Amino acid sequence: MAINTLYLDKGVLKSAMNIFNNQSPRNIRLEKFFQPAIFNILQNKLLQTKYKLKFHPYKHKFFTAKSKEINSFLNGRYFKEIVENIMGVKNYKITYEIRKFEPGNYTLLHDAEKEKLGIDFIIDFSKSNKNFGGYTIYLTETEELLQLIPSPNTISFVEKNKKVMKYTKYVQHKQKYPIILVVGQIQI
């Protein structure tokens, strides 16, 4: 079993759906998402993976990688059940990217490409709770809505409408371990 069995319980999923639906923007973070042994295996694999720099000075600077294990999980039964039971979404398409943020890495708000509507998800494979930047901020033109601070072994879902934008805060030089996130979107 890959994920925490708590997240397969229908009562827990119904409760999570209520929490998701009553937030603004609609969001939820599930903690201790993977079984500890599975999380450690995936985390170590992602820490040892080869990453490529993705850089544009006015848009972003971070590293990306591929993982057949992550791809298999996101297209598998457990992820599908979580999405269906918490968000109530049956048919969807997933896009995602594995990102590694080190000191000096970031993403910026820009209008060069339109953000798609849907439900964002972030799976955190970071090694430490101590963060000096690297958190994802959701905002509108007038207010900050939500900060997702990196926290190992969590998955977060945030619904994005056309007014909501996001960026990843600059990672400071004090950050000891890389922040590794699977950042994706469920397109409805």
Image (tube, grey):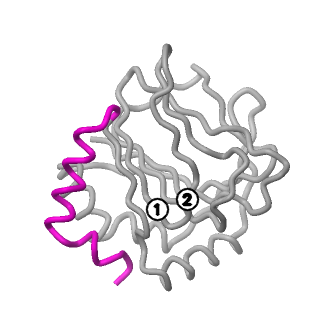
Q: Kindly give the residue lying farthest to the top in the view shown.
A: 142
The residue under label 1 is which amino acid type?
Thr
On the picture, is 32 further left or further right than 102? left
Tell me which segment is drawn in magenta: 1-25
**Crowding near the residue tagged with mark 2, few <14, some 14–19, many ≥20 C-alpha atoms within 10 Å:** many
- Percent position of residue 36, x then y: 48, 81
- Percent position of residue 104, x then y: 81, 44
Helix, strand or loop for disc 2: loop
Residue 60, quarter of picture? top right
The stretch drawn in magenta includes residue 16:
yes
Looking at the image, which residue is at 23% across and 64% down? 81
1 and 2 marks in contact (CB < 8 Å): yes
Looking at the image, which residue is at 27% across and 45% down? 20
The quarter of the rendered structure image containing the C terminus is top left
Residue 57, quarter of picture? top right
Helix, strand or loop for disc 1: strand
Which residue is nearer to you in this view: 145 or 167? Answer: 145
The quarter of the rendered structure image containing the N terminus is bottom left
Above or below 54: residue 40: below
Looking at the image, which residue is at 73% across and 48% down? 132
Q: Which mark is residue 151?
A: 2
On the picture, is 89 further left or further right than 25? left
**Crowding near the residue tagged with mark 1, few <14, some 14–19, many ≥20 C-alpha atoms within 10 Å:** some
Q: Which mark is residue 154?
A: 1
Q: Which mark is residue 77?
A: none
Looking at the image, which residue is at 80% across and 45% down? 172
Marks 1 and 2 sit apart, C-alpha to C-alpha, by: 6 Å
Magenta segment, prevailing SS (helix, strand or loop): helix
The residue under label 2 is which amino acid type?
Ser
Above or below 44: residue 112: above
Which residue is nearer to you in this view: 151 or 179? Answer: 151
